[in-house]
Image (cartoon, rainbow, N blue to C red):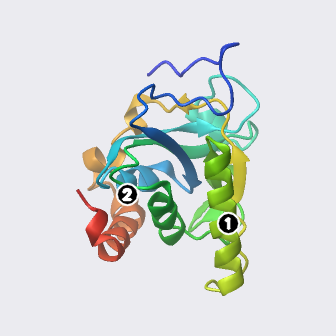
């Protein structure tokens, strides 16, 4: 099991885990992190897409604890990307078009607070961008129900256990992957051909 990143007194909610000024960080919760990771790993300009947990009340949560719904954590994918290749706005477009942002605490058969739709922003600029696009989506009434995606300050990111990383790549024949992850990946590939590496 990987050792999660430890909170320390130097950290702030906007801490960027990548120190290079050429890269930025985005963190999204959009249901099962296996689905989210499988999509964002394919995007040109994305260096890493790591499954993990954010937004909860305890340190170093385990998958079992998060799945209990008692810790307050969300299954997220933290993305380190090159904004000169792919913009935060483009990542948000992929995020909103590859899950149901109108369904509270649920994506398909996966139900619970750990599956809620949320953008954890790492800067005030990301916050403003996410809120602006969310408002535009609601104004356009493109969905049958309001977009309820949370826009919240990033908190401490805990990397999920090793067996969750690269899950679809390594377990694509598993029944859940074939029934749930693969259709989302195929939808992404159809909608965003120009973004695929």
Q: Is residue 130 above or below residue 108?
A: above
Residue 126: x and y in percent read 61, 50
* Residue at the disc numbered 2: 39
**Residue nearer the viewer, 147 or 115:** 147
The mark nearer the N terminus, 2 or 1, is: 2
Q: Which residue sits furthest left?
A: 197
Quarter of the image with the C terminus in it:
bottom left
Helix, strand or loop at mark 1: helix
Q: Is residue 44 left or right of residue 122?
A: left
Q: Is residue 73 visible?
A: yes
Q: Could you classify mark 1 by the number of other residues whose Cα lies within 10 Å: few (under 14), some (14-19), or many (20 or more)? A: few
The spot of residue 90 in percent (x, y) is: 45, 62
Placement of the N terminus among the 4 image quadrants: top left
Residue drawn 57% across and 35% down?
63
Q: Nearer the viewer, residue 3 or 108?
A: 3
Q: Are marks 2 and 1 in contact (CB under 8 Å)?
A: no
Q: Mark 2 against mark 1, which lies toward the viewer?
A: 1
Instruction: Name the one closer to the observer, 8 or 106.
Output: 8
Residue 111 seen = no
Residue 142 in the image, given as x and y percentages of width and height: 61, 85
Give the residue pinned by disc 1: 132
Which residue lies at the image location 36% right of the left edge and 69% below the top edge? 188
In the rendered image, residue 181, in percent from the top left (x then y), is placed at 39, 61
Please state which of residues 23 and 142 is positioned toward the viewer in this rendering.
Answer: 23
Q: Is the residue 175 above or below the residue 165 in the image?
A: below
Q: Is residue 146 above or below residue 86?
A: below
């Amino acid at each position: 099991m990987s050792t999660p990143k430890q909170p320390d007194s130097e950290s702030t909610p906007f801490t960027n885990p990548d120190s290079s000024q050429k890269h930025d960080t985005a963190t999204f919760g959009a249901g099962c992190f296996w689905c989210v990771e499988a999509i964002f790993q394919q995007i040109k300009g994305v260096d890493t897409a790591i499954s993990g947990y954010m937004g909860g009340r305890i340190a170093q949560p385990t998958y079992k604890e998060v799945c209990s719904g008692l810790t307050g954590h969300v299954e997220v994918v933290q993305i380190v990307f090159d904004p000169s290749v792919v913009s935060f706005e483009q990542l948000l477009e992929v995020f909103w078009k590859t899950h149901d942002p109108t369904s509270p605490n649920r994506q398909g058969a996966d139900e619970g607070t750990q599956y809620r739709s949320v953008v954890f922003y790492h800067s005030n600029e990301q916050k403003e961008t996410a809120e602006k696009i969310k408002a535009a989506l609601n104004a356009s009434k493109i969905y049958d129900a309001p977009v309820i995606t949370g826009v919240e300050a990033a908190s401490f990111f805990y990397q999920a256990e090793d067996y969750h990383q690269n899950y679809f790549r390594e377990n694509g024949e598993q029944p859940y992957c074939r029934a749930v992850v693969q259709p989302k990946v195929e939808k992404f590939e159809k909608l965003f051909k120009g973004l695929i590496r």
